[in-house]
Amino acid sequence: MSELFSENSRNGITRDLIEALFPMFEEASAGAIAVDRDARITWINSSYSHLLGLGDPSAVIGKPVRQVIPQTRMPEVVKTGKPLLLDIMEHNQQQLVVTRLPFYDDDGGIVGAVAFVLYDDLQPLTPLVSKYRRLHQDLAAARKALAKKARGTRYSLGDFVGASPAALEVKRRARLAAGREMPVLLLGETGTGKEVLAQAIHSVSARAEKPFVGVNVAAIPDNLLEAEFFGVAPGAYTGADRRTREGKFQLANGGTLFLDEVGDMPLPLQAKLLRALQEGEIEPLGSNKVSQVDVRVIAATSRNLEAMIAEGDFRSDLYYRLNVLEIPIPPLRDRLVDLGVLCEALLGEICDGLDMRGEITDAGVSALGSYDWPGNIRELRNVLERALTMSEEGGLLDADAIFKVLPRSGTRPTSSLTPQPVRPLSQTLAEAEAQAIEEALVASRGNRTRAAKLLGISRSVLYEKLGKMS
Ligand SMILES: Nc1ncnc2c1ncn2[C@@H]1O[C@H](COP(=O)(O)OP(=O)(O)OP(=O)(O)O)[C@@H](O)[C@H]1O
């Protein structure tokens, strides 16, 4: 401590208080350092010198702090006299959360500055930051939903983002579907935007002012599905409500019923659904009265219904009834050219209502293109959200930021249930290395200097490795 405050700056009650508090801060932090008014190191504690990987801490005393910690902003604090209360600093590829405070002599002149490393690992903060962002997103989504409440939908056709020929074809068919009353079948992997599209079709159809009701068949236990779809008559079974419970068909009357994951519907219910669609009438559970409903059905599935029909798991008559207009939605990996516009739209959504910007560089977009996106746009959104949470560049995502959060595998993850043959370690390592190099080259658009930098190796080592790979 004696080295920290000079003799003439140690007077006064404030100074005493600071001196009393200092050991507590120092102990609670992951490291502390002080500089004089010329930003030269006057003191560094052992935990910080250990964290920075310095051999002998006394060897750095008197040195300009930038010489030892290139990214530090202590010179700025000494110069402006303004504290930097929470800052993220990178040192040797490690992110540190730092607080820097100036200190003054009794005449108000700046004597130097002190810094505390509050966290030497951002990981513990991730849940907090994510939670904060999620709350803001929920708020923004709730506001958006309220604005669209009259329509009962959150999405319109403009929300299905994409300018590739495949995406434009999807939108063309959706517009066609909106203008007609026929049933629509949306086919696509998980996260490709089936629900976005179903809501969009409804919101530009003649039924737009009527309810849009969605039901995910896969999410409801089989024994509850019938009640969920067709409702329950009062006292239908022991313990049933005395009042009528409306099913999704009644709730959607006049509007659109979106049947998500229709391929997961058990066969007995398929028969009842077919009747409801053919006759336009439903029979609530425990009732012997049928009632008329006017519902337009949009169904969706990620399963191969034709294969299910061949196996006897899906009724072909129901399939033909649902599949009057089919809209196949391509997986993201088949329309990678849309990555740029999708990122722009998703980053805008993620940052909506937050005091931050979210942007991605061209190299960041190329890095995203090296992955095959089994979870499609939902997964893309999650990756961007994670990258923003971890980003240090004020929300600008470059290839480094993307690779930090992108799942390692460039191909679909193989099922853990499928035992993989054990191979020599050298072979596995060589493959992993080749993949990392490929990813770096994709991210750098073939620029080898940049690729080497991304990989943290010299250009010559990269050339040597490329030579061995070819
Ligand atoms: N074309 C798109 N443009 C913009 N955002 C999209 C697009 N497709 C999907 N999304 C976003 O991806 C997420 C998943 O979309 P959605 O729920 O519609 O997918 P889904 O195909 O219905 O998935 P699942 O089959 O798992 O229910 C949502 O956050 C949605 O906003």
Image: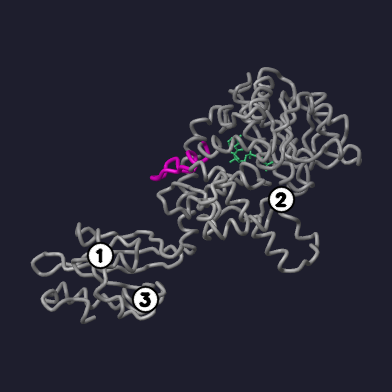
Q: Residues within 10 Å of mark 3 (few under 14, many from 20)?
A: some
| Ligand 1 in which quarter | top right
Q: Label for residue 101?
A: 1
Instruction: Identify the mark nearer the N-term, 3 or 1.
Output: 3
Q: Amino acid at mark 3?
A: Ser
* Of 50 and 307, the residue lying toward us: 50
* Of 124 and 313, the residue lying toward us: 124
| 333 left or right, relative to 91 | right
Query: What residue lies at 37% left-to-right and 74% top-to-bottom?
Result: 48
Q: Residues within 10 Å of mark 1 (few under 14, many from 20)?
A: some
Instruction: Give how far apart the Cα atoms at labels 2 and 1 are.
Output: 49 Å
Is residue 276 part of the magenta span, yes or no?
A: no
Q: Position of residue 118 (x, y in %)?
A: 37, 67
Circle 3 is placed at which residue position? 49
Instruction: Identify the mark nearer the N-term, 2 or 3.
Output: 3
Instruction: Give how far apart the Cα atoms at labels 3 and 1 are.
Output: 19 Å
Mark 3–mark 1 CB contact (< 8 Å)? no
Query: Extreme left residue here?
Result: 107
Above or below — where is 440 with respect to 64?
A: above
| 230 left or right, relative to 100 | right
Above or below — where is 22 with respect to 279?
A: below
Above or below — where is 5 with respect to 199?
A: below
Instruction: Identify the mark nearer the N-term, 2 or 1.
Output: 1
Question: In the structure shown, which secondary structural element does the residue marked by tag 2 occupy?
Answer: loop
Instruction: Give how far apart the Cα atoms at labels 2 and 3 are.
Output: 43 Å
**Quarter of the figure with residue 247:** top right
Q: Amino acid at mark 1?
A: Leu
Question: In the structure shown, which secondary structural element does the residue marked by tag 3 occupy?
Answer: helix
Circle 2 is placed at which residue position? 412
Q: Amino acid at mark 2?
A: Arg
The magenta-colored residue range is 345-360
